[in-house]
Amino acid sequence: MEWGELPPPFYDSIEPYLERQREREYRMKHNWIKHPRDKVGDYQERFLIHFPLGLMMSIPVLGWGLIWLFVYYEWSEDYWVHDFAWKDVAGAIGGYAFGTLIWITLIILWMIGVL
């Protein structure tokens, strides 16, 4: 910048912030999976991304090691990156619970002779 030249207008520097704010408000209004602790608006997205991982963790024997790896990874990520890993864990727990319910239903149906 030359001597006597005016700096760029202030609104140019906050436009990216305003854009992120509009995007956040849109996500908060249009998401159908919400959590009261979510201040960013990405809970639904991160929940649904980690839901299939939870389904894989519910597979007997094969998923048990995946549980430990996932928990350690998320702990490490939250410790170093501070990205609110509880959202990822919530999605995995949801998938794990749903997958376990499917396995229990299949076992019961097998035991009574339907399958």
Image (tube, grey):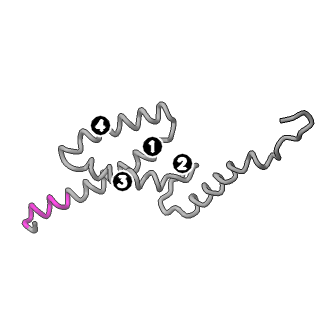
Q: For the residue carrying disc 1, how many other residues have a C-alpha within 10 Å: few (<14), some (14-19), or many (20+)? A: some
Q: Secondary structure at mark 1?
A: helix
Q: What's under tag 4, amino acid-wise?
A: Trp
| Residue 98 screen position, x and y as percent | 30, 57
Left or right of 111? Residue 105 is: right
Number of the label disc, if any, that sits on residue 51:
3
Q: Quadrant of the C terminus?
A: bottom left
Decide which of tag 3 and tag 4 comes sooner along the chain.
3
Q: Residue shown at 29%/41% (left/top)?
A: 67
Q: Residue furthest right?
A: 4
Q: Quadrant of the N terminus?
A: top right
Q: Is residue 111 magenta?
A: yes
| Position above or below: 72 against 62 | above
Q: What's under tag 1, amino acid-wise?
A: Trp
Q: Secondary structure at mark 4?
A: helix
Q: Secondary structure at mark 2?
A: loop
On the image, which quarter does residue 62 sit in?
Answer: top left
Q: Residue shown at 47%/59% (left/top)?
A: 33
Residue bearing the label numbered 2:
37
Q: What's under tag 2, amino acid-wise?
A: Arg
| Residue 96 screen position, x and y as percent | 30, 51
Q: Secondary structure at mark 3?
A: helix
Residue bearing the label numbered 1:
86
Tell me whether circle 1 and circle 2 mark residues in contact (CB < 8 Å). Answer: yes
